[in-house]
């Protein structure tokens, strides 16, 4: 896991060296990645997921500093 600050916000990345998965593959009844992206967006951030079969997966959240000033973002964060 890494946490980086840049001029406009922070990046939080979780990296594993597991088996990875096909990004185009969707499985019925599995909503985790979509919900993670929706929650990131609800607090003013963006989620990026990169995965390659046999190479692992990286999930990165970018949260701009402006998100910390938004009352809606704070309320959404607390509800999550």
Image (cartoon, rainbow, N blue to C red):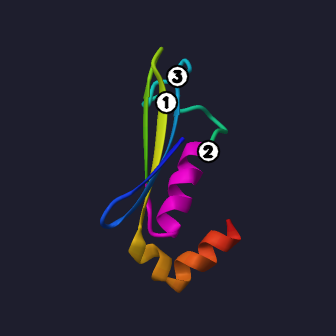
Report x, y in % for residue 1. Answer: 54, 41
Q: Residues within 10 Å of mark 1 (few under 14, many from 20)?
A: many
Q: In this figure, which residue is indicated by the disc labeled 2? A: 31
As measured in the structure, the alpha-carbon distance from the residue carrying label 3 to the one carrying label 2 is: 22 Å
As measured in the structure, the alpha-carbon distance from the residue carrying label 1 to the one carrying label 2 is: 17 Å
Report x, y in % for residue 18. Answer: 56, 20
* N-terminal-most mark, 3 or 1: 3
**Marks 3 & 2, CB-CB < 8 Å contact:** no
Disc 3 secondary structure class: loop
Name the disc covering residue 57, or none.
1
In screen coordinates, is 36 left or right of 79? left
Disc 1 secondary structure class: strand
Residue nearest the viewer, comparing 30 with 41: 41
Magenta highlight: main SS: helix
Asked if residue 1 lies in the magenta stretch, the reply is: no
Closer to the eye: label 1 or 2 = 1
Identify the image quadrant of the C terminus: bottom right
Q: In this figure, which residue is indicated by the disc labeled 3? A: 17
Q: Residues within 10 Å of mark 3 (few under 14, many from 20)?
A: few
Magenta-highlighted residues: 31-46
Above or below residue 64? Residue 49 is above
Report x, y in % for residue 72. Answer: 54, 81
């Amino acid at each position: 896991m890494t946490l980086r600050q840049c001029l406009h916000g922070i990046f939080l990345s979780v990296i594993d060296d597991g088996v990875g998965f096909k990004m185009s593959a969707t499985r019925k009844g599995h909503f985790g990645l979509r919900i993670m992206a929706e929650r990131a967006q609800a607090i003013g951030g963006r989620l990026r997921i990169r995965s390659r079969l046999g190479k692992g997966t990286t999930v990165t959240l970018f949260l701009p500093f402006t998100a910390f000033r938004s009352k809606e973002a704070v309320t959404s964060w607390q509800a999550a």
